[in-house]
Image (cartoon, rainbow, N blue to C red):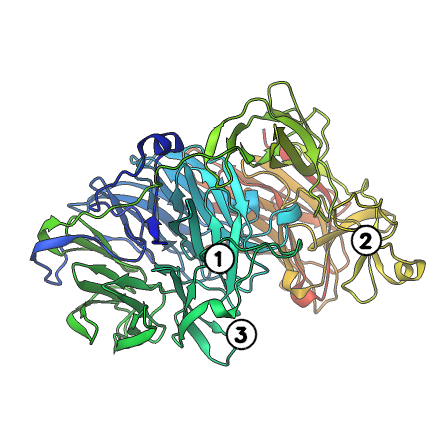
Amino acid sequence: MKSLPVRSFLPFAAVLGLGLLPAAADNWYSWRGPTQDGRSAEKYGKYTFSGKPLWTYDIASRGEPVVANGRIYLFGYHGEGSELVETMSCLDEKTGKLLWEKTFADFLSDNAYTRYAIGAPTIDQDTGLIYLLTTPGEFLCFDPDGNVKFRISMMEAYGRLSFPNGRTGAPVIVGDLVIVRGITANWGGDGPARDRFYAFQKETGALVWASTPGVQPNDSSFSTGIIEMRDGVPVMYATTGCAHYVAINALTGKPLWRWTGGKGGINSSALLVDGLLISAHDKENLDSTETGRMAAVRIPDKALPPGPPEDPVPVLDAKAEVWRFPYSAETSTPSYADGMVFQIVTSGVLYAVDPKEGKELWSVKLGPGNLHSSPTWVDGLLYVPILNDTASEDGLLYVIKPTKEKGEILHRIKLEGFAFGAPAVANGKLYVTTTKHLYCFELGTDVTGKGDWFRLPKSQVGPVASLQAMPQEVILYPGKSQGFSVRSIDAKGYPVGPVTDAKWESFIPPTAKVRATLDAAFNEKGELAAGAQAKTSAGAFKGTAGTAFGIVRGRVMPDIPFTQDFEKFEINQVTLADGTTVKPLVAPPAAPAGAAPAPMAATAEEAAAGTKFAYPPLPWIGGRFKWEVRDMDGGKVLVKTLAPVFFQRAMTFIGSPEMKNYTMQADVMTDGNRRMKSEVGVINQRYLITLKGNSNEIEVSSNQERLKVAAPFTIAAKQWYTLKTRVDVKEDGSGVIRGKAWVKGEPEPDKWTIEVPHSHAHRQGSPGLFGFALQGKQPVYVDNVKVTSND
């Protein structure tokens, strides 16, 4: 069938009544353009491009601007060191004048160097709302005047991981949903690190679905999903950190299939051309010694049967690949126009390929190398940014006339700063970013050829198949409740109508490895309520209306003040002498029919030779397999695990992102000796306060290259210390992070050991624990955690 590219849609009520409504292409709502392939539909009666900018705006960016209703929205950054902040800037389209700007300080990310603003905002054409995912994983929604409609800390709420490359990508809008993605290590079934996609209601920020289409990743991916209508379903295609091309029902999150494209993460966004899904990478391949590949995969023309219960996502075999080229492209995304695919590779070469024949047409060397930048096509010409000129920090912008025979260079413009992004086109203007400026060039006048930003077409709603409850995942506190909006959907995911009579019951998924329940219940108002004495817990509830059902997940977290001394934990697991196999000490009850089989209990000999422990609290984000509760010196303490080494560094959140104005205290200890110790600390309001054993320091940081200040503090191995911290924020947004440490049992010192001012202080953030067992050699220990209000 013919593919129908889709970018954003009407609210569902309007969709079902009005059908397809085209919008003008003089807006550039998302960085890939109206047909999601780097192509503009504009044409010019008079071509006026001269290579001289109409105006520039001083801002660093490694991403792409978007344009709507006379305004430019740009993800950027400015400042240095602890003063560096990411920005959402709104400029006047004609003059480049700043209309408003919002700033965001980095926190707790692994970002290295100044790899910021590697992504783009996305504009919803229905509401004008703008969506952005920042480097530390804050997902924000703005109105056109810069007011924040909602903000979600993906790191603290869902366990989103960050990486030194700092890449974030761009949100995708489908109907009443906005979708973002990232490698997350959440809790329960979503605890293992996977590349996941999250769909939120675009006007409220309520989670609708989370999807895990792939397997364990070897890398991150910031590719942007693309949408097409297939058999009446909006399907999102993307590439992943586990080296797959994936297809997902964009309304429900159901994975439809995946195809293995290599060994490492694929960061190039997918390109859809006549039933082929095309992308590229620069990693190792599974079937050759070549590094890098651009490949085209034939999209299945019918639904595929599911795989086995442990991995039900259908996997396309090698025969799905139609053609390939040995092109190595780290993150650059291919573009398409006039029957040609254009791909910039890491070596700075631009290739043109005939996708129908799988034939290379021509290539042209443009620079010494390239990273993220991708071509944009408009009115018969390609506009191609290149990272930098030879032996300089100046980016380049090429204007190329592509034919089937050659790529003719018409202009070569030197830019100030590295060029990482893709150009945007709107109203006869071209917008290009560098790490120094946003450039505005005139392309032409007498603009015609307005393209369509496709919306979800009119659909006949089918019978009710299941329920969607929103939010799909919640955090509760003792004595508090959470309401839901529930709707029925058909088999394709289209809403049928609201549901007010769902019956709810505690639910344990048949495939659950941890059979846990949430200490809460639904009340007569349809709210999920936690009692005043509700225990810290996590689990799911199943709502049923007729034969349809839906699932919500939830956590009960302690509210401030709270303590945790680990004494009530039952030591019921053992890691065997091989260091990897885990068995229960006592045989658990038999699993119900259809559920995963109950594990075998350890023998007496295995238990005696192994390490006995209990898992940490299930609702902790990023806790399981990184921490264990063990017996020690007549009590129970939390211990940082040593294997696998991949988990040598643990950052675990034990509260909620909204918490603020608190003091956090814990007893901590590092094992080791005078020459080799580890690091242990706490997270207070997005600051990490750490005792660094090898350097004998107490350190305050939020990102290692943005804010990191240390003070001398002698740390002895096998000695317990009490670590106390607090963050005080002033009305002007500045603040002071304070920490003190002393030998456990001795009097608390009057003075703080370290006090660090921060002009862009974090106003809120989940409390957490930190452990770094360097090379998996020396464990660290935590006990007697206390979180109390500063008031």
Amino acid type, label 1: Val
Where does the image place residue 242, in percent across and percent down from the top left? Answer: 53, 62
The outermost residue toward the right is 604
Q: In screen coordinates, is 227 left or right of 627?
A: left
Circle 1 — which element? Answer: strand
Q: Secondary structure at mark 3?
A: loop
Which of marks 3 and 1 precedes in the sequence? 1
Relative to 558, say whether 323 is above or below: below
Q: Give the label on residue 599, or none.
A: 2
Do labels 2 and 1 touch, CB within 8 Å?
no
On the image, the x and y values in percent for residue 529 come to 65, 25
The residue lying at 55 percent from left, 22 percent from top is 500
| Three-letter amino acid code of the residue under disc 3 | Leu
Viewer-nearest of discs 2 and 1: 1
Mark 3 neighbour class, 10 Å CA radius: few under 14, some 14 to 19, many 20 or more: few
Q: Is residue 155 left or right of residue 386?
A: right
Query: Closest to the observer: 419 or 47?
Result: 47
Mark 1 sits on what residue? 246
Separation (CA) of disc 2 from disc 3: 34 Å
The first of marks 2 and 1 along the sequence is: 1
Q: What distance separates the C-alpha of mark 2 from that of mark 1?
A: 32 Å
Q: Are marks 2 and 3 in contact (CB under 8 Å)?
A: no
Q: Quadrant of residue 61?
A: bottom left
Q: Nearer the viewer, residue 612 or 545?
A: 545
Amino acid on which the number 2 mark rests in the picture: Pro
